[in-house]
Amino acid sequence: MGDHRPDLPGDVLSAAGLGAEEEAAYRLLVRTAEVEVAELAGELGVADEAARRALGSLLAKGLARAVPGENDTFTAVAPDVALAARLHRRQEEVDRARQAVEQLTGEYLAHSRRREAAQLIEVVSSRAVLREQLRLMQDNARHEVVSLCRAGHVAMTSQENTEELAALRRGVGFRVLYERALLEEPGMLVNLAEGITLGEQARAFPELPVRMMIADGELGVLPLVQHTGGLTQLTAALVRPSSLLDALKALFESLWERATPVSLTTPGSPLDADHLYLLSLLLAGVPDKSIATQLKVSQRTVQRRITHLMERAGAQTRMQLAWHAARENWL
């Protein structure tokens, strides 16, 4: 049956319109000069009827052809000829569908602006729906997402929010303001560092008044009840362009200006990433013990590094260290 090379993972040709049975048959044809139906069935471990059905589908899609003068013998059409054309057609279909979605979105937004004020706010009463809305907001964001993140998750934890990391990788900006207590939750500091490494701008604030996310300045979401008291359902609002959304954006900017930056790198700062991150967390009010536990170092190591920073700043107290860091633009 010829030379068997390692196969790629199955179903990778589904984008070209091939099912698993068709793909297996086509791969076998590619590896052989020609094959009979019975031989194909034996290699695939299926009945002759199933092999003949798969071959018929490949013939119809232009991926296989009968060998002239040979009864029930078939060979593959070259992949770069047969599959490239199919993929090109699929891509054209995807492009047309994307254009249609953009057009429909434009029409929807144009219509939504003409809605009555009561329709500018949509209430959702399900954690699952809220989680999906947060996912879609980040997946569809084009420019920037801003968030106020309080301690104690409602729809998902920060570690579960993989959509932010994907959006950061494609160039969407993120400004995230974290409540200090949230930074003390297990796993948060490692997760935060990963986001900052990918481009997230992060700041910390002692206590935030509300949870909130706004995407591209056009759609906001926030829970209407901060504490559900153990209830399985919660109530949240989706806020579209309106004076209310403008007020929410102004609230974010006001808190952002007053918050403490959390950084790994700062242009012109003499500190390396580890010491800069430690200083950021220290000035944000995260306790030494919490920093040590989450970063998997001893509390003594954390205190030794803080002492090093104080000596470098010529500070006798942590308050003096904070003053020096602000004056010298260490953060």
Image (tube, helix red, strand yellow):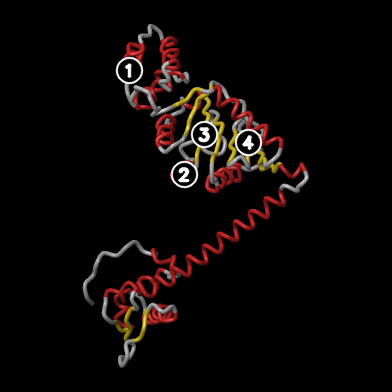
Considering every residue shown, the one lying at the far left of the view is 3
CA gap, disc 1 to disc 2? Answer: 34 Å
Where does label 2 land, which residue?
A: 171
Select label 1 or label 2 by which is in front. 2
Label 3–label 4 contact, CB within 8 A: no
Where does label 1 land, which residue?
A: 305
Label 1–label 3 contact, CB within 8 A: no
Select label 3 or label 4 by which is in front. 3
Nearest to the observer: residue 330 or residue 239: 330
Amino acid type at circle 4 is Leu
Residue ID at (43%, 66%):
14
x and y, in percent, of residue 125 in the image: 66, 42
Mark identifier at residue 175: 3
CA gap, disc 4 to disc 1? Answer: 39 Å
Q: Is residue 8 left or right of residue 114?
A: left
Amino acid type at circle 1 is Arg
Residue ID at (71%, 39%):
242
Quarter the N terminus occupies = bottom left
CA gap, disc 3 to disc 4? Answer: 16 Å
Secondary structure category for the residue under label 3: strand
Residue ID at (24%, 67%):
5
